[in-house]
Amino acid sequence: MKKIRIGFITLFFLLLLCPAAAFNREKNVVSEIDNRALMESPFEGQEEKDFDLFSNLEAYAEDRIGFRDQMISLYTTLNDRLFHEMVHPTYIYGKDDYVFFRPSDNMEFQDYHVKFADMVKTLQTYFEDRGIPFLFVFEPAKATILQDKLHEGINYNNDWVDLFFQELDKRGIHYVDNTQLLYDKQSSGEAVFNKQYDAGHWNDLGAFYGVNQILESLSKVQNGIHINSMDEFDISTEVMTSLLVSDFTIHDEVPVFERKENVVNLTEQYDREVIREDAYPYFHYTQNSRRQREGAPSALVFQGSYINEYGAKFFENSFGEYVGIHDYQNVFHADYYANIFQPDCVIFETAEYTMLDDYFSYDSMFHMYFNPALSSFKDLPEEAHSLSELKLDLKSGSSISSVTVSGLPAEAEHAYLEMDGLMYDLIWVEDTVFTTDAKNENINMNNIHITAICNGKRLFYH
């Protein structure tokens, strides 16, 4: 009997040691159970005043303990089966088994949102001064549309949104708010958000309606935009058996739209050469030959997960050429993408719950800067120069090449390159060096003109 007890105790301690023995020390690990990066080191941020090593060590151990995801999964499954309670780091039950993101503190209107409106205005000015229509798009959170399905005791409040829209209105920003449209559709019995699967975004049906409202608004200032119709898609349903990025068991029948019209997908061809933030690498590039023959425009869309996951197929079906860039942090380099893809129109789309410093850096908003349009200097006297005074270097890639210009005056404030009739903003690198990127098909080094704004003059190099 004593041996059995000793054996049991030994087995018990071995089981306790297993998670420690399987401690996860890998770099750049993202947990599939709660869709976030695990803590890299408990010693990060030692220079900060509020650094707490004990709390960091505790958080690091919780993140990296062996079998973490399996233990969380087992714990959440048992709570659901026994008590119908969702104990999950990301999700929470609402009424009638609806699933929402686990709520955090209500966002309040603050200077961040004023600066965000300034940032959108800067983008609009940059593109519209170049004759390129611009539209800002705001997507509501699922909880905003389905507040009646939140459990009692959850004090959900998004009053800051109305104040933000007032800031947009003050600046004359062209925008679409999809909130009322989605609320009306949901209220009329059309499920534009899934009951359980994907607690953060609209579904394909919601994306169909939301993107069409975007297209209809943009078509007021941009000719040739095709508005989608349901008969252009094969529409079916699919039963989802687990929550998005989680193995939490559900049974949810969701709508699925599949485009009937084929498009040419150029994403892989350009993916390695189009620069994006490491944390937000989404990129999508397609051409629709049918829409091109009909005269549909090309569109550059800075977009979040509402479009990345569900809306892209509807833009593909509408535009002749569609370039989708993950907007978080990348939108601060809008001139880089505009140089490459030379769009006919631009959309900047984001969701209600992503207007945070983690996604759009407050500091980056202050440092975002673009060239004024060359046309704004048309009244300055022009001074002719020979292109031979400058050094032009071409760095060729498989799909995208860089043109670097050296030798402009040190006092040059802005610089522009015209090549085969297309205009590029030259982006300052250092000293007298400027650069721009372009698609290889648009490169013609034998037909280049450069303009620099310097000391109240337009220096024209040809």
Image: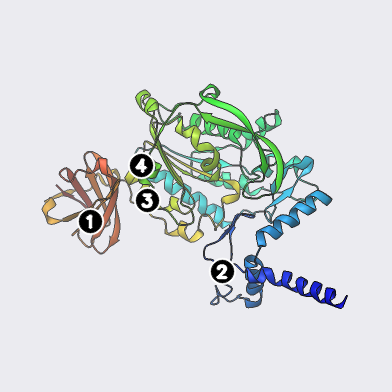
Quote the CA–CA distance across marks 2 and 4: 51 Å
| Residue at x 75% of width, y 74% of height | 13
Q: Nearer the viewer, residue 80 or 74?
A: 74
Q: Secondary structure at mark 3?
A: loop
Give the CA distance from mark 3 to mark 1.
Answer: 36 Å
Q: Which residue is mark 1?
A: 454
- Residue with the mark numbered 2: 25
Distance (Cα) linking label 2 and label 1: 54 Å
> Could you say where residue 103 lies in the image, as x and y percent from the top left?
70, 53
Residue placed most toward the observer, 452 or 187: 187
Query: Quarter of the image holding residue 147?
Result: top right
Q: Secondary structure at mark 1?
A: strand
Q: Amino acid at mark 3?
A: Arg
Q: Which residue is mark 4?
A: 129
**Comes first in the chain, label 2 or label 3:** 2
Whether residue 64 is visible, yes or no, is yes
Q: Disc 2 to disc 3, how far (Cα)?
A: 29 Å
Q: Residues within 10 Å of mark 3 (few under 14, many from 20)?
A: few
Q: Where, quadrant-wise, is the N terminus in this rendering?
A: bottom right
Q: Position of residue 6 (x, y in %)?
A: 81, 77
Tell me which label, 2 or 1, sits earlier in the chain: 2
At label 4, the amino acid type is: Asp
Question: Which label's residue is closer to the chain start, 3 or 4?
Answer: 4
* Residue 299 appears in the picture as rendered: no
